[in-house]
């Protein structure tokens, strides 16, 4: 189970709830779902660069229903740089319609479906990116993906699909599984995505993340880059008692702000 990204600090930034259409085809049947999302915008007129900021995952239906997906701490940093932030609830989370289709089976399964799970998450994240591209106040050529935990994994999966043009992907504790959950299959999944991701990526991990400890994060990074992916790995200082959730806290912003800003400049999102 992964944290969803439940914010523990509440900056003054206020978001607006919007609805994003997502059409999926299952067994030959097409259906459109309404995904809820929170949008944060700078005060000026634009057009602005933009990011899709994606939440984590959870096996518990009650936990999924309670997610807020708002990420006001991180959103305030991005908006302060003049970036529009769109944080969608994926299917079955919070106020969004649909069923939970991004599960990978289980840690004890012979072949957990990590890549398939990421590609399923990518459908929702891609719908959010396409929605942003259609906004008059967004520069459609300057959109990036930012994701926490499973949201980071889904963002990397989306980056294997050139039909949704993005500048790059940044992840906070991004991935599925871990050293205690089918580690060999996890590394194979990172290798598979590394073969397909064609944009620069930034990986942020805390040195006391118990889900993806630094040594395993380095192994994931090696699997991804050895397969052809481009990734900058940043192992950040330990945060409180559990570094997996550092995206949620205002006091952790100094740990990741400079690396994120440098990355966004490098990919041309910030000028």
Image: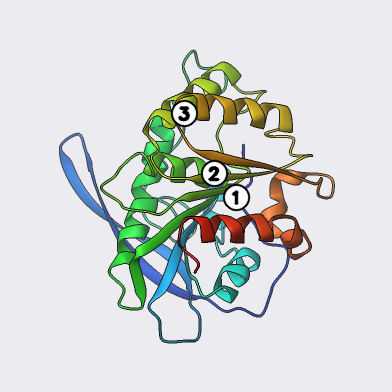
Give the mark nearer the N terminus: 3 vs 2: 2
- Residue 38 position (above or below residue 122): below
Q: Is the residue marked by circle 2 packed among few (<14), some (14-19), or many (20+) residues within 10 Å?
A: many
The structure residue drawn at horizontal position 51% and vertical position 45%, both measured from the top left corner, is: 201
Q: Is the residue marked by circle 1 packed among few (<14), some (14-19), or many (20+) residues within 10 Å?
A: many
Give the mark nearer the N terminus: 2 vs 1: 1
Q: How is the image coloured?
A: rainbow
- Residue 174 position (above or below residue 196): below
Residue receiving disc 3 = 114
Q: Dividing the picture into quarters, in which one does residue 37 lie?
A: bottom left
Q: Is the residue marked by circle 3 packed among few (<14), some (14-19), or many (20+) residues within 10 Å?
A: many
Kindly report the distance in space between the C-alpha atoms of the residues bearing marks 3 and 2. 13 Å
Tell me if residue 242 can be seen: yes
Secondary structure under tag 2 reads: loop
Tell whether label 1 touches label 3 (CB within 8 Å): no
**Farthest residue, direction bottom:** 44
Q: On the rendered structure, is 118 left or right of 31?
A: right
Q: Residue 96: percent from the left, percent from the top? A: 41, 58
Residue receiving disc 1 = 4
Tell whether label 1 touches label 2 (CB within 8 Å): yes
Q: Dividing the picture into quarters, in which one does residue 127 lie?
A: bottom left
Image quarter in which the N terminus is found: top right
Query: Which is nearer the eye, 226 or 90?
Result: 226
Residue receiving disc 2 = 57
**Comparing marks 3 and 1, which lies closer to the viewer?**
3
Q: On the rendered structure, is 50 left or right of 177?
A: left
Tell me if residue 105 can be seen: no
Kindly report the distance in space between the C-alpha atoms of the residues bearing marks 3 and 1. 17 Å
Q: Residue 176: percent from the left, percent from the top? A: 55, 34
The structure residue drawn at horizontal position 53% and vertical position 59%, both measured from the top left corner, is: 264
Secondary structure under tag 1 reads: loop
**Comparing marks 3 and 2, which lies closer to the viewer?**
3
């Amino acid at each position: 189970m992964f944290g969803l990204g439940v914010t523990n600090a509440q900056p003054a930034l206020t978001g607006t709830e919007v609805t994003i259409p997502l059409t999926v085809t299952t067994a030959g049947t097409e259906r459109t779902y309404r995904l809820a999302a929170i949008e944060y915008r700078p005060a000026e007129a634009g057009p602005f660069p933009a990011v899709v900021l994606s939440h984590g995952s959870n096996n518990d239906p009650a936990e999924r229903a309670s997610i807020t997906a708002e990420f006001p701490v991180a959103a305030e940093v991005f908006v302060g740089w003049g970036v529009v932030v769109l944080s969608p609830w994926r299917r079955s989370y919070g106020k969004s319609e649909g069923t939970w289709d991004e599960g990978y089976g289980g840690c004890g399964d012979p072949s957990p479906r990590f890549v398939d799970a990421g590609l399923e998450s990518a459908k929702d994240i891609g719908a959010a990116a396409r929605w942003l591209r259609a906004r008059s106040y967004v520069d459609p050529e300057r959109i990036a993906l930012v994701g926490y935990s499973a949201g980071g994994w889904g963002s990397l999966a989306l980056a294997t699909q050139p039909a949704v043009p993005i500048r790059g992907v940044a992840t906070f504790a991004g991935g599925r599984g871990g050293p205690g959950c089918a580690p060999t299959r996890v590394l194979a999944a990172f290798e598979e995505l590394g073969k397909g991701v064609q944009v620069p990526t930034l990986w942020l991990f805390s040195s006391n993340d118990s889900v993806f400890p630094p040594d395993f994060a380095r192994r994931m990074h090696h699997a991804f880059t050895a397969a052809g992916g481009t990734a900058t790995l940043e192992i950040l200082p330990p945060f409180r008692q559990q570094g997996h959730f550092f995206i949620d806290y205002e006091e952790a912003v100094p740990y990741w702000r400079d690396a994120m800003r440098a990355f966004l400049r490098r990919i041309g999102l910030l000028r």
